[in-house]
Image (cartoon, rainbow, N blue to C red):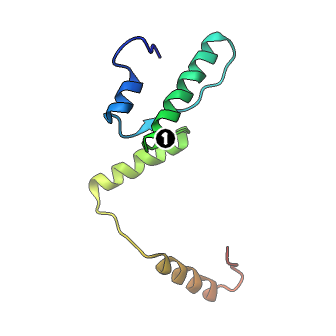
Amino acid sequence: MRREKKPNILDYLLDGRIKLVINIPTNGDGALANRTREDEYAIRRLAVEHNIPVLTTFELAAATVEGLQYLKFQEPEVFAVTDYVAEKDQATQANPRLTSL
């Protein structure tokens, strides 16, 4: 990230123009990898400080995209936690070999 170049991602985060950050940490050695890790950390930290969600794995990013696509075409169903507990209790009663978590 070139902090001297304006605007940059940090400016966009501060301005509230970015609502979600996908920032998957990199691996590697050398000066470029170290600079990249510093930039990634700065982006993640600023996002968290401003309550912007940060996704840090490919799997989480893919699951989030899948969920957003689902919401685009279907109305979400909302259930109370007690509904899940009741369903789990019914399954346990039907098959006593199941154990509670």
Instruction: Identify the image quadrant of the C terminus.
Output: bottom right
Residues 96 and 37: in front is: 37
In the displayed structure, would residue 92 be above or below residue 74? below
Q: Secondary structure at mark 1?
A: helix
Q: Residue at x 53, y 38 (%)?
A: 58
Q: Which residue appears at 45% of the width and 44% of the height? A: 53
Q: Amino acid at mark 1?
A: Val
Number of numbered discs: 1
The residue indicated by pointer 1 is 48
Vertical relation: 57 (above or below) 31: below
Q: Give whichever of 26, 69 is nearer the camera.
A: 26
Q: Is residue 19 above or below residue 95?
A: above
Q: In the current view of this chain or complex, which residue is farthest to the bottom?
A: 93
- Answer with the quarter of the image where residue 77 lies: bottom left
Residue 56 lies in what quarter of the image?
A: top right
Circle 1: is it few (<14), some (14-19), or many (20+) Cα within 10 Å? Answer: few
Counting from the top left corner in percent of width and height, residue 25 is at: 59, 30
Q: Quadrant of residue 38?
A: top right
Q: Position of residue 86 (x, y in %)?
A: 52, 84
Drawn side of residue 35 relative to residue 8, left or right:
right
Residue found at x 40% / y 40% = 20
Q: Residue at x 47, y 80 (%)?
A: 83
Residue 88 in percent (x, y) is at 57, 79
Q: In the shown orientation, is residue 97 left or right of residue 42? A: right
Residue 24, horizontal then vertical, whole percent: 54, 32
